[in-house]
Image (cartoon, rainbow, N blue to C red):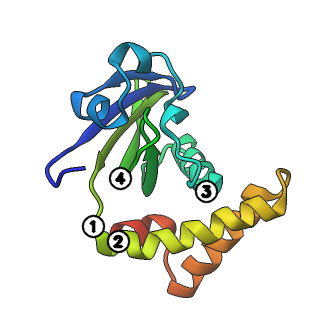
Amino acid sequence: MRDNDFIVSKTDLKGLIIYANEIFIEFCGYTQHELLNTQHNIIRHPDMPRAVFDLMWKTLQAGNGFNGYVKNMSKDGGFYWAFANVTPSYDNNQNITGYYSVRRKPSQRTLAVVEPIYKEMLQTEKHSGSRDAIKDSTAVLLSKLEQQGVSYDQFALSL
């Protein structure tokens, strides 16, 4: 990503893409037609720990915004890192109707901190088996955050 780029997307409650800006289309390599009404996880890179997305969905479903780092995969198999701010969208009755995400380029310094943690989490997921993968990977993340005395959101925003 370039320093001044903002990737923007909107999804419905099930994670289906209902809006994608031109920067998103450029970096992911899919056409707007290919993206719309497709699960947002179409760009999920296999190097991303599932526990991060589990944390994100739990945070969003509780009505809170999520800040975090994600490695996305483009259609051609390439990848790009992004700092994501994801927030629930509400109707006039304060019901969550979907999610709005704005992503920007993280610094190399930030990635030097995040990548080893995600790598350890991913290794834990692979070794734990499908039943315990997310739980065990989350424990790795929470242990690291506890050592620093911060929440994931505080950690993400501090980098």
Q: How crowded is mark 3: few (under 14 residues within 10 Å), some or many (20 or more)?
A: many
Q: Which of marks 3 and 2 is nearer the N terminus?
A: 3
Q: Which of marks 3 and 4 is nearer the N terminus?
A: 3
Residue 105 picture location, percent across and down: 27, 55
Give the vertical position of 34 relative to 87 (above or below): above
Q: What residue type is labelled 4?
A: Ala
Q: In this view, does 24 lie to the left or right of 62?
A: left
Quarter assignment of residue 20: top left
Q: What residue type is labelled 3?
A: Pro
Q: Distance between the residues labelled 3 and 4?
A: 15 Å
Q: What element carries label 3?
A: loop
| Along the viewing direction, whichever of 147 and 107 lies nearer the viewer | 107
**Residue holding disc 3:** 49
Q: Distance between the residues labelled 2 and 4?
A: 11 Å
**Residue holding disc 4:** 82
**Residue holding disc 2:** 110
Q: In which quarter of the image is the C terminus?
A: bottom left
Q: Is residue 36 left or right of residue 44?
A: left
Q: Residue furthest bottom?
A: 147
Q: Is mark 1 on a helix, strand or loop?
A: loop
Q: What element carries label 4?
A: strand
Q: What residue type is labelled 2?
A: Thr
| Along the viewing direction, whichever of 22 and 73 lies nearer the viewer | 73
Residue occupying the point 75% across, 59% down: 126
Q: Residue furthest front?
A: 76
Residue occupying the point 22% across, 43% down: 6
Q: Residue 107 carries which label?
A: 1
